[in-house]
Each structure stands twice: as structure tokens, then as C-alpha cells.
Image: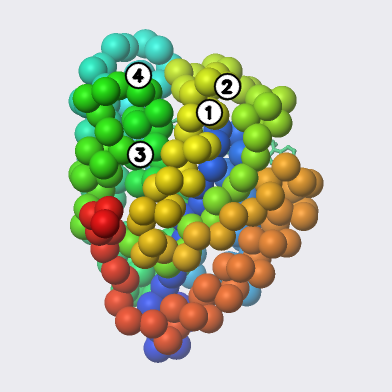
């Protein structure tokens, strides 16, 4: 199958963000299949990637099997993204569109939502500087109450309504402060099909746009 590079363009970097159980993984899988059927080469990755050595430490922490200091776990989440940064950039250059399920935005807001006075949002954003800049960020917006009704909620460390409410507010702040990506807010409280319809339209427009765009950018500091 020809990649977008053989048609003269790079791939797009599309990030899907939202609260726990907002439907990110379901929509990422839908979008991968949809874009592949439309003839694009696509990869789907998710953070944390729990398969690497760093990812295994994160997994143990999220399941409550280990205690790790707030700053240290934050840096591990970021290191987990840096492990994949070069391969993401190479794929994009080679015309492959990369869909990422959670990214730096989650990294900053979940750590800042712990309300540790020594861990500000600005501090939490700093290890993300220089990572690939998404072309599009799809934010699946759902209330913490609605998300809590969905399957499997409550099993991991951050899955409680106090934390999720803080996370929701901080997502708004970080999107205002980091304006490089095109952030599209999608009402994720609707049916799977209604959400997918919106996502497919927005992603298709994004791919058309990046075909004419310059190289992928990098995440930058807050103003
Ligand atoms: N974290 C993550 C950090 O603290 N720092 C970081 O840097 C990063 C990257 C794990 C935790 O790590 C934190 C954030 C998280 O607390 P995760 O593994 O991505 O991150 O965990 P979740 O976000 O909880 O991932 P989930 O896969 O559980 O949730 P999704 O992907 O949002 O939801 P999905 O698609 O799996 O759907 C959940 C359920 O809802 C149903 C699905 O069928 C499924 O049962 N569903 C719907 N039901 C009705 N209507 C819809 N529209 C639905 N969409 C999905």
C-alpha cells in the first residue's frame, strides 16, 4: 500500500486525550481502521506503554503494587514517551500517520492534579519540551460522573472523582497554555458511533492539511 510519503506528504501525528474511561482506546482503534480503509498507513500507540522496563515500573505503580515519589513517577511517564520519540518522528517522515492514546497533556495534568505544592503544572510540563508536537489533539470530553459509570472504572490509582475533576480542569488550562496543536473538543458522552463520526471527519481534514504542511514541530514551553 502506498504511504502518504510516496504521495509526496508526511504522516500526521494525532493524539487522543481525555479522562479515564472517556473512550480513548475505543476511538483510537476505530480511527486506525477508518484511516487504513481510506488508504493511509497508520500506527497506533498508547501511553503509558507498559511493555518496556520503564513501562513495567509505571504499571506496578498504577496498580498500587509499588510506591514511587510523585516527581520520580512523573519523570518515568515522560521517559516512557521519550523512549518512542525518535521512532514516531521517523514514521511521520516516512508518511505513516501515528495515532497516540494519551500523551504529554495527560502527563502534565495528572501529576499536577495531585496538588503536591512542589509539583506545579509548569514543572510537570518541562520534561515534555522537545517531544514531537501533535498536529491534532482530539479531547474526548466527558463528566467524571459519566466516566465512572463505564466498565472497569475504579481499579487503578487515579480513578476517583476528586482526581478526575481536577484533571478535567487542568486539561483546559494546559490546552490554553500550549497552543501548538489544533485541539478539538468532542462530546464523548454520546454513543460510540456519534463520537466516531465526528472524529473521522476531523481527522480526515487534518490529514489533508498536513499533506501540504512543513515538518513536524516540537512541544514548547508555556508562555
Ligand atoms: N497517566 C497517563 C499519567 O498519570 N501520566 C501520563 O503521562 C500518562 C500517559 C492509565 C493512567 O495513567 C495516567 C492516566 C490514567 O489514570 P490508561 O492506561 O490510558 O492510563 O487508562 P485509561 O484512560 O483509564 O484507559 P482506558 O482504556 O481504561 O480508558 P479509555 O481508553 O478512555 O476508554 P475505553 O475506550 O477503553 O472505554 C472504556 C469503557 O467504556 C466503554 C467501552 O466499551 C469500555 O467498556 N465505552 C463507551 N460506553 C458507552 N458510550 C461510549 N461512547 C463509550 N466509549 C467507550
Q: Earlier in the sequence, mark 4 or mark 2?
A: 4
Cα–Cα span, label 1 and label 3: 14 Å
Q: Secondary structure at mark 3?
A: helix
Frontmost of labels 2 and 3 is 2
Q: Which residue is mark 1?
A: 164
Quadrant hosting residue 155: top right
Q: Which mark is residue 61?
A: 4
Which residue was labeled with disc 3?
107
Query: In this picture, is 176 found above or below 8?
Result: above
Residue 88 rendering spot, x and y as whole percentages = 32, 60
The span from disc 4 to disc 2 (Cα, nearest Å) is: 19 Å
Quadrant (top left, top right, bottom left, bottom right) of the C terminus: bottom left
Query: Is disc 1 in contact with disc 2, using a CB cutoff of under 8 Å?
Result: yes
- Which residue is located at x 21 percent, y 45 percent? 126
Residue 179 horizontal/vertical position (percent): 38, 61
For label 4, the crowd category at 10 Å Cα-Cα, with few meaning under 14, some 14 to 19 and many 20 or more, is some
Compared to residue 161, the image places residue 217 above or below, namely: below
Closest to the observer: 189 or 115? 115
Q: Residue at x 60, y 59 (%)?
A: 31
Residue 40 in picture, x, y percent from top left:
53, 73
Q: Residues within 10 Å of mark 2 (few under 14, many from 20)?
A: some
Is label 3 within 8 A of ligand 1 (CB to nearest ligand atom)? yes
User: Is the residue marked by circle 1 packed among few (<14), some (14-19), or many (20+) residues within 10 Å?
Assistant: many
Query: Disc 2 designates what residue?
Result: 161
Amino acid at each position: 500500500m502506498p504511504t502518504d510519503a510516496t504521495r509526496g506528504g508526511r504522516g500526521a501525528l494525532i493524539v487522543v486525550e481525555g479522562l479515564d474511561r472517556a473512550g480513548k482506546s475505543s476511538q483510537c482503534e476505530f480511527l486506525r481502521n477508518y484511516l487504513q480503509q481510506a488508504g493511509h498507513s497508520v500506527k497506533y500507540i498508547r501511553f503509558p506503554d507498559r511493555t518496556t522496563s520503564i513501562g513495567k515500573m509505571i504499571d506496578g505503580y498504577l496498580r498500587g503494587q509499588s510506591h514511587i515519589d510523585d516527581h520520580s513517577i512523573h519523570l518515568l511517564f515522560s521517559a516512557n514517551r521519550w523512549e518512542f520519540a525518535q521512532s514516531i518522528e521517523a514514521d511521520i517522515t516516512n508518511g505513516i500517520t501515528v495515532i497516540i492514546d494519551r500523551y504529554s497533556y495527560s502527563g502534565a495534568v495528572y501529576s499536577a492534579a495531585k496538588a503536591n505544592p512542589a509539583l506545579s503544572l509548569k514543572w510537570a510540563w518541562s520534561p515534555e519540551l522537545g517531544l514531537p508536537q501533535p498536529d491534532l489533539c482530539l479531547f474526548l470530553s466527558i463528566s467524571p460522573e459519566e466516566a465512572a459509570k463505564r466498565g472497569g472504572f475504579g481499579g487503578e490509582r487515579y480513578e476517583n472523582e476528586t482526581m478526575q475533576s481536577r484533571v478535567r480542569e487542568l486539561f483546559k488550562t494546559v490546552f490554553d497554555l500550549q497552543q501548538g496543536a489544533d485541539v478539538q473538543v468532542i462530546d464523548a458522552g454520546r454513543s460510540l458511533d456519534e463520537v466516531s463520526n465526528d472524529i473521522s471527519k476531523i481527522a480526515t481534514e487534518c490529514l489533508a492539511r498536513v499533506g501540504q504542511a512543513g515538518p513536524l514541530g516540537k512541544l514548547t514551553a508555556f508562555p
